[in-house]
Each structure stands twice: as C-alpha cells, then as structure tokens.
Amino acid sequence: MTPVTVIGLGPMGTALAEAFVKAGHPTTVWNRTAAKAAPLVAMGAVHAKRIEDAVAASPLVIACLTRYDDTRQALEPAAAALKGRALITLNSGSPAGAREMADWAAGHGARFLDGAIKNVPSAVGAPDTLLYYSGDKTVFDDHLATLKILGGDTVHLGAEPDLAALYEMAVGGTLLPALVGFFQGAAAVQARGLEADTLVRFTVKWLEMISSILPAFAREIDSGDYTKPMSSVNVFLAGVAYDEELGKEANLDVTWQAPLHDLLKRAVEAGHGDHSIAALTEVLKRPERAA
Amino acid sequence: MTPVTVIGLGPMGTALAEAFVKAGHPTTVWNRTAAKAAPLVAMGAVHAKRIEDAVAASPLVIACLTRYDDTRQALEPAAAALKGRALITLNSGSPAGAREMADWAAGHGARFLDGAIKNVPSAVGAPDTLLYYSGDKTVFDDHLATLKILGGDTVHLGAEPDLAALYEMAVGGTLLPALVGFFQGAAAVQARGLEADTLVRFTVKWLEMISSILPAFAREIDSGDYTKPMSSVNVFLAGVAYDEELGKEANLDVTWQAPLHDLLKRAVEAGHGDHSIAALTEVLKRPERAA
C-alpha cells in the first residue's frame, strides 16, 4: 500500500483522504487550518503540522485546494521535498493555469499529473465515479490502483498536462445554464402552488433524454454536416414564444434566455434554419477562428 | 383491444401509431399529407382520408400535431363526431394553450386529456419512457393499458388540463441552455484539435451528477432555506473567470453567459452570496411576485 499525502481538507480533500484511510493506505494529511484534520486522525490518518513533513511522508502527494495559485503558495515551503515525488492536483482552473502548475512542478523535479473530479464529495469512492487526469503517464500507471480508490472510472486523457483542465471546463459549461433552467421551472411550478420537488423526477428523465442525443450531436459537430437534423434550429426558434408565455404566466424574469434566442436567430441568418440545432456550435466560434 | 385513431403523422405521431399497430390495436391514422400514412397501412393501420372518418373510427383519438392551433384547425370539420369520445393531445404549447384546447374539446362534448412525451420518437414504447397527462382522469383510467403502450412510465398529474403543459415547459427550460453549454465545450475541444465525440461520455456523467443534486436543490427551494449550501453563489461566481479564459483560449463567443453571470451578481446583491446556488430561483421571480 503506497503511502499517500493529501494537501487541503475542504469537503473534497477530506473525502479523498477518508477514502485512502478506509482502503488501508498510510495517509498523511495537511491543512492550513489544522483543526480540520482531527476527524481524519481519529480514523487513522497522520496529521503533519508542517507542509514539508506532509510532502516528505509519501511518494504520492495529492493537492486538493481551490486554485492552482493556492496550491503553489501552499507547496512553496515544501518545494525542495517534491523532487522525485508524484504530485497530483485536483482543483478547478483553466488550461493555462494547469500549464503554469506543470511548469512549476517540473522546475522542482516533481512528476506531475493534473486531475478533475467532476462530482460531489459523497461520490468519492463509488465504482462509477469519474476522475480524469492528464500529464505524466508514468504517475498514472504507477499509481492506478491507488487512484481507483477515489472512483472506479479513472481515465488518462493524454500527456499534455492541461487536457484535464480543458475537459473540466468544456464539460462544466452545462452546469450553470442547466441549473438556471431547472430553477426557472421550479419557480414556475411554485407560482402554481406546487412544490419544486414534483419537478425533479421529470427533469431527471429529461436530462437522461438529453444525454441520449449527445452522441448524434457530436457526430454532426465532428463531421460539420448539420443537414440531416433530428431537431432543427427553426424548431427551437418556434419554441421561444412558449418560454415568453411561461415567463408572463408565472411572473418570472426570463430575460437570461435572450442571448440564447439571439444565437438561434444568428444561426438562421447564417443559413442554419433547417439545419440541426448542433449548428449553434459554429455560431459560437468567433469569425476569425471560423474563417 | 380499444380501437385508436392517431391524427398527425410527423415523426412522433408515426411512432405512436406504429406502437399501437404493433401492440395489436385496431389503428386508424390521418394526416394532411396522405402519403405519410402508407408505411403504417403496410403494417396494418387503416388510413382515413377524411378526418371525420378518422375520428368516428375509434373511441380514443390521439392528436399529435405541432401546436394546439393546428390541432383545432385539423379537428374542426370532425368536431361533431368528437361527442362522447376521448381526445388526447400530445403537442408542444403553453398552459394557456392547453386551457383553450380543453375548453374547445368540452364545447364539443369530448372527454379531454392533454399529454406530453418529453423524448425522441425512437423512445416511444420503451418501459422507462415517460409520458405525463393532465385533465379528465376517467380518460386516463379507462385507457391506461393502451397509453402504457407508448411508454411504461405513464403519469396523471391532475384534473386541471394545463398541468401537463406547465410541467412540459418547466422541464423543457433546461434543454437549450444545456445544449449550448455542450456545444461550447465541443467547440473548445475542437479548437485543440480533438473531436467533440470525446466529450460525450464526460458530459453524460456530468448530467448524471446534476441529476443527483436536484432533489437537494428542490428541498431548498420548497423550504426557502438556502443557508446550508452544498455549493454557494460565491463559488459559482469564482468560476466565471474560468469561462472567460476558456472563451479566449478557444476563440469562442461566450457572451451568451453574461446574463447568467449577472444573475449571480444580483443574487450576491440580494444577500445570497454565501447561500446555495438554488437561491437564484428567488432572483428569477419578478419583484411584484416575490413581494
């Protein structure tokens, strides 16, 4: 069992450390606010007061802080101890941030992997929980069994250290818009005196339906052929009026949808009216790139 | 086996009629463009040239046209024949449209049920396909076995005929924003020379994660207590910078997100910064309603 160090004990870092402790790995933890380590110590983890000792305790160091900047700042006093160790970052950030982090880690002789866990802390350790990584493949291969403790669906995207951040952002772009769509629906059923809870099971099925059509949309986007639509831009444009009616009936501010409707109109102007809704992908590309 | 009439043979109407034929129901079909009936006739359906004959052929008439207006216009010549029959509409539309449709049906002595099938035509007939209805409960009860041929997950929302349209719109509000989020991600991975298809399996898992957190959000919305957040408005606001970085790096127009970010800022101004992201629901309510 490889000794593991977990840096950063927010809800996600705590869940990661807990999974390692439960799996029987010698686990060292460090957090800026030391008190957060106490429950993990009670479970069998070792608390390192100094970050230098935390890093020195294990060949595998996993940092789960908020941003790359925070990670570098926290690790700076322990930089010398990183030499020859495997360092994995699991935080949010941009591809550029991941590249900077990778350069920093390389400069200190660490073998670096960046990862993303796009899930809630309670999902850590489940057989179908997805974590994806990019960067040094030897770190991934050497520690695969250990990494799988965090989630059964563990993937290496490639050697470029910023791929995990790229995919994290590409995937994450659906979250806020989908949630606002749900909140709007919740406010609409509430306006009728019904509970938001009654909407959940229908929305869950709806999200499953959306998932089922994504492969076809991806094929259209990859081929650039939008001419055999399941659902056309014009069909979506015809639905815009219903959204406005709902807004009036439920007394909701639906203006956040205006730029989405504008995208539909721009797609029609670009000749995509009878094409697949996936043609919006082309409208999102800035002209200088599309040209 | 109850004889069934299906009015409107677009992709969805055709799928409905096909399911009834395959299940052994005497099935009569009508469409403005008669040629669309041919494949169904080859399978065993009866094609009625006149809509009066189509309606007269069955005690259960299911109309699957584009809008309520189209449905009334198509049925007008057959209005006298509707008396005593069960009429079910399965089209898109607003709650107000459903109420008008119900009044029209009642005026002609039909027993009326409005329904929604929030799925693709190929999902018709599957055991977990969801259809929900509202309106005359006796129609639902009398024909439940027949309706279940269209999807195993068949629900009656209530006697008010506009509830299915309300839920359809409340649920549907996630579609366009979620898709645009996916298209943006697809354009971002394409900008890196990768295929959109590589994003699908990650987005599918992500949508499953979103589904898993909806019950907790609904509880917050129903209780009005946003003070114990899984994920706060401020956390989302901190992520805005990453979206802008992604836009620059992938040369994408991400301005469609601006009003979503504005909602976050308005939530902070309203004192919801450290509250759950579900507090956006309150920001979506117009002041005159919230007050």
Image (tube, coloured by chain):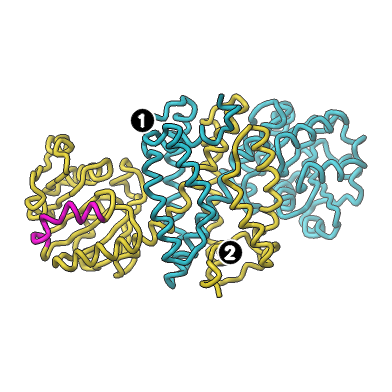
Chain colours: A yellow, B cyan
Crowdedness near tag 1: few (<14), some (14–19) or many (≥20) residues, C-alpha within 10 Å: few
Residue, disc 1:
B228
**Region of the chain picked out in magenta, as a range:** A69-82
Mark 2 lies on a secondary structure that is helix
- Residues tagged by mark 2 and mark 1 found on one chain of the structure: no
What residue is drawn where x is 45% and y is 55%?
B203
- Residue A77 in magenta stretch: yes
Is residue B137 shown above or below B260? above
Chain ID, mark 2? A
Residue, disc 2:
A283
- Residue B207 in magenta stretch: no
What residue is drawn where x is 56% and y is 75%?
A291
Please count the marks in the image. 2
Q: Nearer the viewer, residue A170 or B130?
A: A170
What residue is drawn where x is 28% and y is 49%?
A66
The label on residue B123 is: none
